[in-house]
Amino acid sequence: MSAWLITGGSPARRRFEALELARARLCPGHSEDPPCRDCRRIQDFLHPDFLALAPEIESGPIKIDRVREALRFASGRPYEASARVVWIEKAEALLEEGANALLKSLEEPPAFLTWILGSESRDLILPTVRSRCRLHRLAGDSAPGRTGRFRDHGVSEPDARDAAAFGLEPGDDRDLDRSREIRERTLRALASGETSALLLLAAEFADDAEWASLLAALLRDAAVLASGVEPSMLIHAGAASEIRRVSRAYPADALRRAAVEAAGLAADDRLNRNPRLSRERVLLGLRKASRPGRGIGGRRSTRGEEGG
Ligand SMILES: [Zn+2]
């Protein structure tokens, strides 16, 4: 994948990372000190194979004409270097039309081309754009001296950790985005403790054996967290705060029991039992043990809700 999305950190820090990446692509043999002529031209935005696309007005949008211009540049052969780089400092300033125009090139750029997009937050970027980019997330506070990761393995720590939790190859960003989204939805439903939300989950993922193992891991994590273990010990440490909400909504022993049952779901699937019903059994069994009013959906009334 030759499209990067750099998020988080300060604008200066994102620019620094982008320029580092551009230097690595356009001047592979460059030395740090003193910077060579090419590196200086990249830094000054004067390199003929480096294009920076910015809004015309500070907080304005990036107009479609500018996007088309960038696409023409992106499809042309390099002048001097063996590569071309386009840097979109504020990708959130792309309007929908402009973002859509980029999609094809982001997905299948010519071999010599690298896109670098930047944004304060990945949440500001259209999912269609985001899923086509390799994510490079910077910490909220910039830790100096942690550059060069692009050239090492190109995956930030949280991404690598989440990829491992989902059993994905590091750098498989499309599946990572989707897996995170499913995890988020699952945790939200669990924390709400609402029957309808839980039934929806059971129906949606009735045929998904991977989801069953995700559910088992999340319930295990919630049980572990409830017993006072460090969040860093969680399988899904990247979702610790959402998992904590789940752990507050149910007693630890109910979570542990449900985790074991969830782990058995995959076996049920193989025996061809009704997978949707077995998922419902686990989720609604857990719900029965829920602590009223402790989850996100704390508006449930306890009055007259005995039995269940
Ligand atoms: Zn250089």
Image: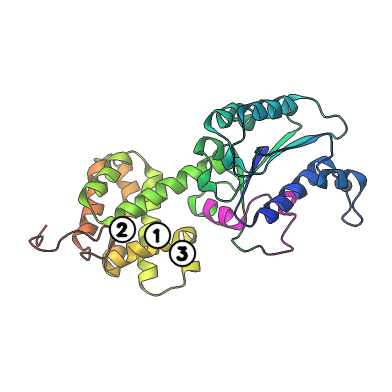
- Disc 2 + disc 1, Cβ < 8 Å: yes
**Mark 1 Cα-neighbour bin, 10 Å: few <14, some 14–19, many ≥20:** some
In the image, which residues are magenta? 143-163
Q: Nearer the viewer, mark 2 or mark 3?
A: 2
**What residue is pinned by disc 1?**
242
Amino acid type, label 2: Ala
Q: Earlier in the sequence, mark 3 or mark 1?
A: 3
| Residue at image coords 30%, 45% | 201
Report whether 238 appears left or right of 258: right
| Residue at image coords 38%, 46% | 211
Residue 234 is labelled as: 3
Could you say which quadrant of the image residue 207 lies in? Answer: top left
Q: Is residue 161 magenta?
A: yes
**Mark 2 Cα-neighbour bin, 10 Å: few <14, some 14–19, many ≥20:** many
Seen from the viewer's position, the closer of residues 110 and 272 is 110
Q: Position of residue 288 (x, y in %)?
A: 18, 60
Q: Position of residue 221 (x, y in %)?
A: 40, 63
Which quadrant of the rendered structure holds the N terminus?
Answer: top right
Report whether 59 appears left or right of 276: right
Question: Separation of disc 2 and disc 1 at Cα?
Answer: 8 Å
